[in-house]
Image (spheres, coloured by chain):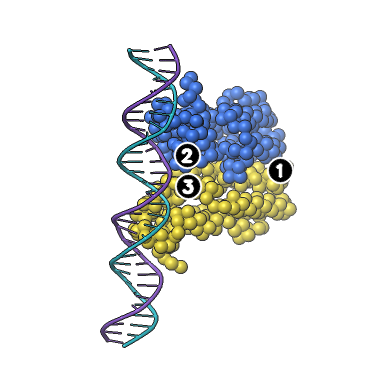
Chain colours: A yellow, B blue, C purple, D cyan
Amino acid sequence: MNTTKEHIMKTALKLFLQKSFKEVTMKEIVQKTGLSKGAFYHYFPSKQDLFSEIINTYYLKMAAVEYERFDRKSFYGFYHDYVEYIMNEFMALKKLLEDTNDEDDINYLTIAFDAIHIIPDFNLKVEELHVLELTAWAEAVARGRASGELDTVMTDDQIACMFVYSNDGIGLHLIQEGRVKQLGPKMLELWDGFYNEIKA
Amino acid sequence: MNTTKEHIMKTALKLFLQKSFKEVTMKEIVQKTGLSKGAFYHYFPSKQDLFSEIINTYYLKMAAVEYERFDRKSFYGFYHDYVEYIMNEFMALKKLLEDTNDEDDINYLTIAFDAIHIIPDFNLKVEELHVLELTAWAEAVARGRASGELDTVMTDDQIACMFVYSNDGIGLHLIQEGRVKQLGPKMLELWDGFYNEIKA
DNA sequence: TTTTTTAAACCGAACGTCCGGTCTGTATTG
DNA sequence: CAATACAGACCGGACGTTCGGTTTAAAAAA
């Protein structure tokens, strides 16, 4: 693929993960890429088009978690695989952005809120992913229950919700505190506690 | 208090709950208030000052939940009081904004992310509230455990985290879907399920 | 091999618009 | 009369975008 275009997209993604669409200026994008405005508009018809392409290329692809790759034998294995997967994705993103500075945090919510306003059907796509997420978790719970691993009065959906939403909630707090990289360990600690409660 | 100033603040708050600080323009604020630029700058030295005053007057005050008002006899009563409290606060906000249109949704996260960049010590204040929140929940759990209401292998802090973060997670999703008003019922349903699991 | 052609890559000054903010003037109030 | 409350024309700067032009490098022609 065209390396310059990719370079622009990565640089802009880094900026969009730090501040909102409006706060990121063309001047800034051009400066950080080391290119000129002319070069930029040679590759993208507009700032909005760049944003759309970034969302489709990076955000939506990362948001689609591959649950089928996680352990199906035990629920314990499932959620541990999930945490490992998320941590790997996080490191892969850092590497993609060539973000050597550990201080620079990533805010994946502001970019999502912008996408809602800018990209048609973004909400629809995210909603689809959300349904897939909940069903994948609920199925993992069902398997754990069937195998005798889990024993709880809660429904599969309720447990799925607890895992998914506690994950989102912690993510939100860590973004606010600028410590997103701690998401994995934090989740594991909390989920292990909850697992002890629902296991047989 | 000065009614015109209050009118400006409420109108602007409504806008800041719909889009980001940068997306809300002075022109828009002036138009929606039905005033002029001269009038606005008579009451506020700048757009940023308006924003700061809105955060301090409305956001931070609403974010400070009065946990001491909730039931202390049972954990069940505690979290039910919490849900009722949140729903009342939500309706009070709607009324404050004279927001008769049910369609207009409330995004309290974008305004918070803006506040992080604009207001010094905002993060500190929110972090303090977060600690208070977690301790209030943990204490409620401890009381429930002491009274024999709760029986669980999870620690007080872990249960507190599950309640707080699942709340935040659902809130986040409802903001994305534009259905924040459903927060109360959604929480209650999920929490009742979890309560059945941890009760004696 | 050398020259010519061609198209993509890239540059940066310039453009019109919109932004937050100022300033001068005019009612209104006490 | 003095202070407050407002109106709106106006300002400089920043914004995203455009456009005429230059550089580069590979293909085609000599």
Residue at 36 percent across and 57 percent down: it is A37
Mark pair 3, 2: CA separation:
21 Å
- The chain carrying label 3 is A
Q: Amino acid at mark 1?
A: Met
Q: How many marks?
A: 3
Can residue A120 be spotted in the picture? Answer: yes
- In the image, what residue type sits under mark 3? Asn
Q: Residue at x 39, y 32 (%)?
A: B46
Q: Residue at x 67, y 33 (%)?
A: B150
Give the chain letter at badge 1: A
Q: Secondary structure at mark 3?
A: loop
Residue behind mark 2: B24
Q: Nearer the viewer, residue B17 or A111?
A: B17
Identify the mark nearer the N-term, 1 or 3: 3
Amino acid type assigned to the residue bearing label 2 in the image: Val
Q: Which mark is residue B16?
A: none
Q: Is residue A136 above or below residue B195?
A: below
Chain letter for mark 2, please: B
Can you tell which mark lies on residue A107? 3
Near mark 1 (Cα within 10 A), the count class, few <14, some 14-19 or many ≥20, is some
Residue at the disc numbered 1: A154
Mark 2 Cα within 10 Å, few/some/many (few <14, many 20+)?
A: some
Residue at horizontal 48%, vertical 56%?
Answer: A49
State whether residue A133 appears in this view: no
Whether residue A56 sits left or right of residue B101 in the image: it is left
The secondary structure type at the circle numbered 2 is loop
Q: How far is disc 1 from disc 3 in space, using C-alphas?
A: 33 Å
Coordinates of residue B110 in the picture (x, y in percent): 50, 40
